[in-house]
Image: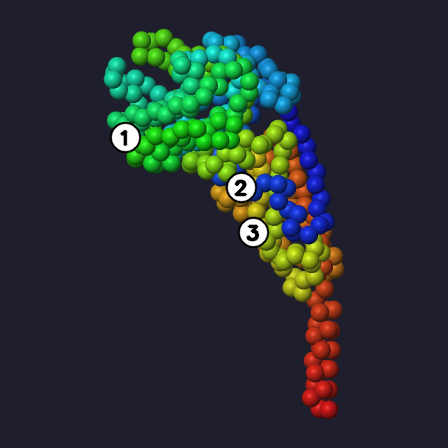
Amino acid sequence: MKKSISIIILLIASFYTFGQSVNLDKGLILYFPLNGNFEDFSKNRNDGIPFGKFDEHPDRLGNSSSSFLFKGSSYFKVKDFETPKHITISAWIKTSERKIDIFTKHKYIDNNRQKGFIFFIHANGLLTFAASTNGTNWVQTRAPETVSDNKWHHVVATYDGAKIKIYIDGYFQSEEELNGDLTNYDWDAYCGVRKQSNDSFNYFRGGIDELRVYDRALNEKEIQELYKLSDESVITITITSPDISRGFKVIEKNNEITISGNVRANNGIRELTIDQEPVELDENGNFSKKIKLKEGENQIYIFAIDWQDNTAVQKLVITHNSANKETIKKEDNKDSRSQQKE
């Protein structure tokens, strides 16, 4: 569900964190909230292509029409998905079934060789992640406990170049060693289906929500933050320059000032503007922009929009008072000279 946030902050800088301590935008290459559509809300905008019939379903928080129910013959395709060298796959799932696939980019080369990666629930009910590097090394790891209990679970698979790992509900479950980089093949990726070696298909049956894919392996702290996220948008705007450690009102002698800082959102930042002008962000959400000041009070607004159209705005008051500062400086000099003469 989309929600709008309007925040004008006139407090000290130490209150900026809004409870988020990690950057969950960095490396996000696919993000499907699955709130009634198959839009990709990452910067890549690689929307999913649905096949079959889906039912809109309440999510883990009870919000209506905020996840999709996969009915055993439905799935969606992510066309031209480029496999990163390292990866994180994250999703919320609810199912009582086994031998079903969550997110895959995979092919059987022959009965003995497989390429790509598979994130799925094995026939024994255990969450499993399998992947190959260089088209030869095929390794899999399985969690020790089942998630096929018809309850919502947060499931995560990662590969960091040395190990594949599985997490359930924020906690590490299992790992296996695997070396090298994942190989990108000219195939599409799929959510909810995988073709078997005998040409049969494994379809997902149950609810899927909040599917995310990163081009890096998230660490355990980041995964726990993902687990704790709700559908509420959290947008954090942090100012590093000018110095606002004493508040958001700044006195500036020069007629130009550089505003620098960082912006983050759990749904990803779509756009940042300062005084209605777009500002470029680097991959970590850092920004910097020079602003011309008029004499007197300048009210500067920093406005952020995430990929679900939630908004946050921060107000910075900068007073440009060059004449007053020069007067004070001259008076100080005069007093200093007077004291020297005495």
Q: Residue at x 72, y 64 (%)?
A: 321
Picture quadrant where residue 228 is located: top right
> Which residue is the site of mark 3?
288
The reply, left or right, for residue 17 in relation to residue 27 is right
Dot 2: within a 10 Å radius of its alpha carbon, few (fewer than 14), some, or many (20 or more) residues? some
Is disc 1 placed on a helix, strand or loop? loop
> Which residue is the site of mark 1?
134
Q: Amino acid at mark 2?
A: Val
Q: Answer yes or no: do the residues labelled 2 and 3 have beta carbons within 8 Å?
A: no
The reply, left or right, for residue 322 in relation to residue 288 is right
Picture quadrant where residue 150 is located: top right
Is disc 3 placed on a helix, strand or loop? strand
Q: Residue at x 73, y 91 (%)?
A: 342
Q: Answer yes or no: do the residues labelled 2 and 1 have beta carbons within 8 Å?
A: no
Q: Nearer the viewer, mark 2 or mark 3?
A: 2
Answer above or below: position of 195 versus 176: above
